[in-house]
Amino acid sequence: MSLKLPQAPGAGLFKQGYSSYSNADGQINKSIAAIREIHQMCLTSMGPCGRNKIIVNHLGRTIVTNDAATMLRELEIVHPAVKVLVMATEQQKIDVGDGTNFVMVLAGELLNVAEKLVALGLSPVEIIQGYNMARNYTLAELDQLVVDEIADKNDREQLAKVTRAVIASKQYGNEDLLSRLVSEAVAHVLPKGTASGAFNVDSIRVVKIMGGALSNSTVIKGMVFNREPEGHVKALEAGKKHKVAVFACPLDIAATETKGTVLLHNAQEMLDFSKGEEKQIDAMMKEIADMGVECVVAGAGVGELALHYLNRYGVLVLKVPSKFELRRICRVCGATPMARLGAPTPEEVGMVDVVKTMEIGGDRVTVFKQEEDEVSRTATIILRGATQNHLDDIERAIDDGVSAIKGLMKPDGGKLLPGAGATEIELVSRITKFGEKTPGLLQLAIKQFALAFEIVPRTLAETSGQDVNEVLPNLYAAHSDETGEGLYKGVDIDGESADGITDIRQDGIYDMLEMKKFAVNVATDAACTVLSVDQIIMAKKAGGPAAPQARKPGNWDHDD
């Protein structure tokens, strides 16, 4: 009689290399434990006093940031449950720009409290039902908590009010300067009386130039390129309009696709052959100059011979290798990029007021600028700073601020909620009351959903170095005020008040309603998705065996 050896479940079902984790093996608890690791990492980075993380990615690039979406994008996460939360933060970043840490922290906390409910004996289905009821109630209550609204979306002061809190969570201390730069750049781009949704995030560019201080940063209406023109002509005459031609093809003789052989009988034929090429390029460049074009932007290479003739005709030549930059410069000048070399038609020619070369720090840059009366569709923020990592982090903060403006342009985007954890504390008490009125086991899930929101003011108080056990009771007491003034009380991260509470109206700390709604929606969906999974089946990674590692330098007999 043969001996029957025990086998792994599903061994005959899947190909070799598959791994399966079910709820019988405690899959939910393991997934929540994995999410807790990444949740703890993002928790300390939340808020204006949040700590930065240094991440060295697989390419060896060092990133210093406290933005959850950036951290999670650079980390190579393989756990499928954690990836659900990573996708949720990415979606928040794309749609609203701000609140990525909030999504990660709230989703992680919802799963933490759900673990206790699972231990009590509630099924994941009951928890999901309770969470969905609480989410619907929360979205309705957020509309009741609106305390301010942006009426004029073209006013710089009003725009700065929205971007200030967004930028403060990434660059605390520089929020006034950066929000002023963002609102100034957006005001250049938005025409007066613009319709909602007319704002394009791509219209705001950031150019980082090392040296100087952040206070030296400026906004230029138009485009700034981190390179100077190719030829002798470095600037165009000020005070008049200049025609611009944009070429997506190389400024050179086109090489034929088939190989050809030229038979030359004597030296004269050789001279005539090279002269014919010169005459051909000369004729092309003369055609361009005769159209009145004073500036040529090349998206590919510029031949030496073409550059020589363009210099002779007094045409400024700028090489822009990036197709995205080429698209933006067409938007600034109103030009059409041409795929053929030759004279442009009047419809393909763009117009620009100023083309000049400036020296900023030690770098020479080229500026394409439209004058004040023109509506330019692109603005550039020139950032100055000491280190590249610092400039990169400031650029991410500005990107978040610009994305917040995109959220502001939505139909209900102008509505503002109290910030500094005031909204979350108010939601805790309101959702808890709603849970107490709900019959059955669902009230347990609803109450725990409410408790999850406490993580925001708790973290704000912790990261700013205050005693949480004092600040939170004071906040709850302030929000129980019947007059409605308690709604404006938030965490004082500066520690100027004795009780750790500040009035958000004085400090101008507001959160966008659109951002908060989207974040609550996305975080609840992500948590419910993880709870609804009862089995994870993972296939073996594609690809063959790993490549052999190169031998370490030194003697083969040494351990090192």
Image (cartoon, rainbow, N blue to C red):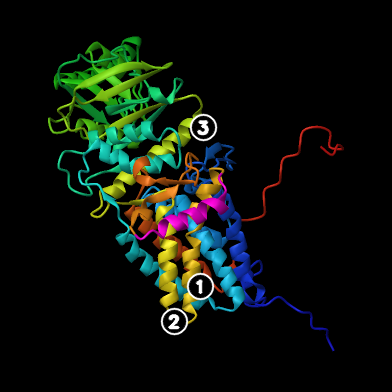
Which span is picked out in magenta?
A: 466-482
Q: Which residue is mark 1?
A: 532
The reply to whether the magenta stretch includes residue 481 is yes
Does 26 sit left or right of 295 as displayed? right
Image quadrant where residue 290 sits: top left
Label whose residue precedes the other's in the sequence (3 or 2): 3
Residue 359 position within the rendered picture, expressed as x and y whole percent measured from the top left = 37, 15
The residue depicted at 23 percent of the width and 15 percent of the height is 236
Label whose residue precedes the other's in the sequence (3 or 1): 3
The reply to whether the magenta stretch includes residue 262 is no
Q: Which residue is mark 3?
A: 389
Cα distance in 3D space between marks 2 and 1 = 23 Å
Q: Which residue is mark 2?
A: 439
Of all residues, the one furthest to the bottom in this rendering is 1
Cα distance in 3D space between marks 3 and 2 = 53 Å
Q: Amino acid at mark 2?
A: Pro
Does 419 sit left or right of 186 as displayed? right
Label 3: few (<14), some (14–19) or many (≥20) C-alpha neighbours in 10 Å: some
Towards the viewer: 98 or 85: 98
Cα distance in 3D space between marks 3 and 1 = 40 Å
The residue depicted at 70 percent of the width and 75 percent of the height is 8
Of all residues, the one furthest to the left in this rendering is 346
- Residue 1, disc: none
Q: Please, what secondary structure does the residue beneath circle 1 have?
A: loop
- Judge whether residue 245 can be spotted in this image: yes
